[in-house]
């Protein structure tokens, strides 16, 4: 007896130490209450194994090899004394630290290097040292052509971006904190990808806050989990409503019944008053998030594995985002059909926007 008690206390203690997934719990409660109201046999709750559909591809499939562009760097360093900023950039790249730049820092460095090359070319345009002018022009052209690949390596080899675009164990909480910094950082990176190579990337000092914002946010992965779980919950709820109407209409004579009043109460208290506010928060974040991912998927030279993953999340067809929107529309329609058949829908004479106090 003591052993069983100790085991139970240990399980309760371990459960208490785990963070609560109140977003999924809200959905499970809603489905159970809806199932009871329609007198269903069973309900399928969300299985987190479904999230594996949105697993990030291996990094090796997303990172590309970039040929090293070199043009007599030793001679160049000696000859660009008229362009000290460029000389400094080249020396920095050849240093031990410069050779170990992380991909996101390399993106900033390549922007700084090209700005220094452009400034040096402008300085030499008066006709001095035409050979150096030609070499710098060729270097600038080759380096600029590589910028899209440098950008994608910065994202695909970045732990910050991987963390933000990998599904989380938990869904968004029911009262999530603001995530404007991360959503804005994602939007800026998407705009940057589509502006390359005509517009140079910003400096490392300007890029670092963007990657940090993504790293500091838990809500990218949580949003993926929320969209997946809500899509399941809404479709399962729609199935319950639709099957009840097909099997045995709630109000067979088109007039309100006690069961119809129970259904109206579930709609007011647990859908409109509980699940819908959560849906609105997820949709608001998802709208910005999905727009940025679609922009990224359309940018130049995006690796195929990355593009497919982004489209799987937010593409215009058969994506997580599109499925969520379709499930939302279906569920609203299922509720409208059920309540209208009883004369209890919003705008009808039997509508009562106040939920009964008793739980259903």
Image (cartoon, grey):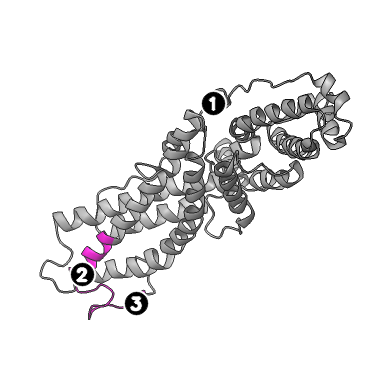
Secondary structure found at label 3: loop
- In this rendering, the label closer to the viewer, 2 or 1: 1
Question: Quick one: label 3 or label 1, which is nearer the N terminus?
Answer: 1
Q: Which residue is mark 2?
A: 340
Q: Which mark is residue 353?
A: 3
Q: Nearer the viewer, residue 101 or 325?
A: 101
In the image, residue 38 sits, relative to residue 78, either above or below, namely: below
Question: Quick one: label 2 or label 1, which is nearer the N terminus?
Answer: 1
The residue carrying pointer 2 sits among few (fewer than 14), some (14 to 19) or many (20 or more) residues within 10 Å by Cα, namely many
Question: Quick one: label 2 or label 3, which is nearer the N terminus?
Answer: 2
> Where is residue 34, by image quadrant?
bottom left
State the image coordinates of residue 86 (x, y, percent, origin top left): 82, 34
Q: Nearer the viewer, residue 329 or 259?
A: 329
Looking at the image, can residue 320 be seen? yes
Q: Residue at x 47, y 49 (%)?
A: 226
Q: Is residue 156 magenta?
A: no
Figure disc tally: 3
**Horizontally, is 165 left or right of 38 in the view?**
right
> Magenta part of the protein: which range?
333-355
Q: Residue at x 25, y 65 (%)?
A: 336
């Amino acid at each position: 007896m003591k052993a069983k008690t100790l085991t139970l206390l240990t399980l309760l203690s371990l459960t208490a130490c785990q963070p609560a997934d109140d977003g999924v719990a809200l959905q499970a409660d809603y489905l159970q209450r809806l199932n009871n109201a329609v007198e269903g046999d069973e309900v399928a709750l969300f299985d987190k194994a479904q999230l594996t559909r949105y697993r990030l591809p291996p990094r090796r499939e997303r990172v590309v090899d970039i040929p090293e562009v070199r043009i007599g760097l030793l001679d160049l360093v000696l000859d660009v004394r008229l362009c000290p900023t460029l000389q400094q950039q080249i020396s920095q790249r050849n240093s031990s630290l410069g050779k170990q730049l992380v991909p996101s820092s390399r993106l900033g460095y390549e922007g700084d290097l090209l700005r220094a090359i452009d400034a040096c070319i402008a300085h030499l345009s008066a006709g001095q040292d035409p050979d150096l002018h030609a070499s710098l022009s060729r270097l600038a052209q080759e380096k600029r052509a590589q910028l899209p690949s440098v950008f994608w390596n910065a994202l695909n080899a970045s732990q910050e971006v991987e963390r933000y675009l990998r599904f989380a164990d938990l869904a968004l909480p029911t009262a999530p904190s603001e995530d404007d910094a991360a959503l804005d950082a994602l939007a800026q990176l998407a705009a940057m990808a589509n502006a390359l190579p005509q517009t140079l990337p910003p400096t490392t000092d300007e890029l670092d806050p963007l990657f940090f914002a993504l790293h500091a946010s838990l809500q990218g992965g949580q949003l993926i989990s929320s969209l997946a779980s809500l899509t399941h919950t809404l479709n399962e709820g729609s199935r319950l409503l639709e099957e009840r109407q097909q099997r045995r209409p709630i109000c067979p004579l088109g007039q309100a019944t006690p069961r119809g009043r129970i259904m109206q109460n579930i709609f007011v208290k647990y859908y409109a008053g509980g699940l819908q506010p959560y849906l609105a928060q997820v949709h608001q974040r998802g709208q910005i998030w999905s727009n940025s991912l679609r922009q990224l998927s359309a940018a130049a030279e995006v690796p195929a594995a990355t593009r497919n993953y982004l489209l799987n999340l937010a593409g215009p067809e058969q994506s997580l985002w599109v499925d969520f929107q379709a499930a939302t529309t279906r569920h609203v329609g299922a509720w409208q059909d059920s309540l209208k058949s009883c004369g209890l829908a919003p705008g009808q004479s039997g509508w009562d926007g106040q939920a009964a106090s008793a739980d259903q």
